Amino acid sequence: MSTRPEILFPLFASLETLPGVGAKTAKALEQMGVASPRDLLFTLPASGIDRRFRKTINGLVFPTVATTQVTIERHRPARVKGRPYRVDVSDAETSFALVFFHARDDWLARQLPVGEERIVSGRLELFDGVAQMVHPDHILPVGQADTLPDFEPVYPLTQGVTLKVMTKAAAASVDRAPELAEWIDPTLLAQKAWPTWRAAIGQAHAPEGSSDLMATAPHRERLAYDELFAHQLTLALARARRRKKKGRANVATGKLQSKVLAALPYTPTGAQTRAIAEISDDLAAEERMNRLLQGDVGAGKTLVALMALLVAVEAGGQGVMMAPTEILARQHLMALQPLAEQAGVVLEILTGRDKGSERAAKLKALAGGDIQILVGTHAVFQKDVEFKDLRLAVIDEQHRFGVAQRMELGRKGARADVLVMTATPIPRSLSLAQYGDMDVSVLDEKPPGRTPVTTALTSAQRMDEVVDHLRSAVGEGRQAYWVCPLVDESEVSDLTAAEERFKRLRAAFPEGQVGLVHGQMPPREKDAAMANFVAGKTNVLVATTVIEVGVDVPNASIMVIERAETFGLAQLHQLRGRVGRGAEASTCLLMYQPPLSETGRRRLEILRETEDGFRIAEEDLQMRGAGDVIGTAQSGLPRFQVADLERQAGLMATANSDARKLIEEDPTLESDRGKAVRVLLWLMEQDKAIQMISVG
């Protein structure tokens, strides 16, 4: 069934088949992303207006919207151009004026004949102590009073589309909505007491009060679930399809792994051990692995990644580890090389900086299988980079690599397994939306030997005191990061620039003690500045957020973040994770520009309260919304029309497990429920998923 089912045809007809929608309106609606009656069904009212009938406007608090029956007393046309036309009216107890600008006198005389009665509804306000209704929203003959709903839905609009047109078109779309076979699991449906899909659509477009507009209203919740379920089905089908693709069984012998474990000065945490076991099981299976390793700052992902890469080598193949930046790739090299040496494994690095004969020699060794583990940046994607037998690709900091790059890397190895790592704890709902097709391992414990970081807040007005404290700490041999928000002084922004801060600090410290690193520097200078800091030649490193991910300097125990209120929570948590890596007690100083906004203060206080990255990520999601937490542009996060990822995390988790269960039990969607689900996928325009079923 790879064509749209006939029952849905009316919903995918052209907009111009709806009453009141001509070519011009259709074009305006398309600007809003509404291209069919189906899209109108999922464009739900955002608010509503109380249009309940009142005997009189007496006693109302202005301004307000009111609906009442009036007698037309007299017309007062505008005497001067630009003045309004007034019509005096009275209800059961009092009188007021209807006011019109630029209206035609003959039209008003026909609409509102003196002595007759009408129902009027609109916004009332006081003007010079007199109640008036400017341009009533509705003027109806008394006999048509019941055509006005008690609660009128208000839709999102765009230029060229009035509420009247939108309401009429939405109502006509609802009339076209067919009764569809149920695709939700019967137990869940009963437990939640949700209406059928057809009833839910009807209720969503005919709210009876503001409670019907809330995400928690049963009909809205049902529609949100349908949307999340369709999305998770697509991911579950992708996962099932990828699992069908033959991988290779990479069975660990444990020979190399045991050498590394023996050389470690500590015992891996329970979370590390669990993740290593999950990954080893995946690698040993015939299907291709597609796993996400999520770990909080400093939870020890690097060790887990190395153990996985050693499985590939033990099985007779090669592994590659990719990092988004040169600094990070070099750091992985520094962390992994000594351990690889213990195991007698050849580990090399390849970045854009390798040129000429040096590069040629590396490529030859890689193609010949002499390099067993390669660490690199996106330079690894280049055409001439060939592996002898690539078994595992580990990708660090997933959100910097697109899906296309993941696939490109997959092609380098005939049937390579993929492990994706991220140091950004992602709230469960988002991680399911973004990585629902992957299996997830979570590192939620800190390795021993990491000291907690004391977090303090201070106002930027106390800058001089901060510099004095820093001077005495440096005198005791400690090292510090000083993070600035922007690189160059721009008029639009009063954020202190890194260059300026560098000059000021350089003047306050002995010669050569302060270094600078920012994104605009040539890579060689950046690496040199980092190397000097790592070697302890400089004691204070002034930096922009380039140091956010992965930089590891155990002796650095102080982190000053300037204008901390301008950063996102997750980013502040990442930056703080750069200290507390050695035995020295560490401090993170969040410096803010007063006055702080309510949310600004709340953000900084959350950081002071906890070091748990997952809790911080959940709070960040509550405060900023999904798009900002991941950065929607490059996140591949789907845009949902009804569902709200921040508030409906539980629904997403249910949709994920339900979709996986259904696809395991009925992979080709042939059962009765499976067939209903196919209709849902067409309804939700998940064409990719439909192709996956038809291709199998």
Image: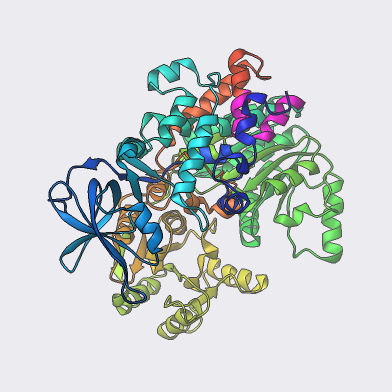
What colour scheme governs how the chains and residues are painted in the rendered image of this protein?
rainbow
Q: Is residue 73 above or below residue 679?
A: below
List x then y, in percent, for residue 491. 47, 82
List x then y, in percent, for residue 649. 43, 36
Residue furthest top in the image: 671
Tell me if residue 457 can be seen.
Answer: yes
For residue 694: magenta?
Answer: yes
For residue 79: magenta?
Answer: no
Q: Main secondary structure of the magenta part?
A: helix
Say which of 392 and 131 sits in front: 131
Count of number-bearing discs: 0
Q: Residue at x 71, y 47 (%)?
A: 404
Quadrant housing residue 146: top left
For the N terminus, the image quarter is top right
Q: Residue at x 36, y 71 (%)?
A: 473
Q: Residue at x 29, y 71 (%)?
A: 594
Say which of 139 and 481 sits in front: 139
Q: Which residues are the magenta region?
A: 678-696
Quadrant housing residue 675: top right
Say which of 439 and 29 sits in front: 29
Tell me if residue 397 can be seen.
Answer: no
For the C terminus, the image quarter is top right
List x then y, in percent, for residue 469. 32, 73
Q: Is residue 99 above or below residue 81?
A: above
List x then y, in percent, for residue 551. 54, 59
Q: Is residue 179 above or below residue 407?
A: above
Q: Is residue 185 above or below residue 309?
A: above
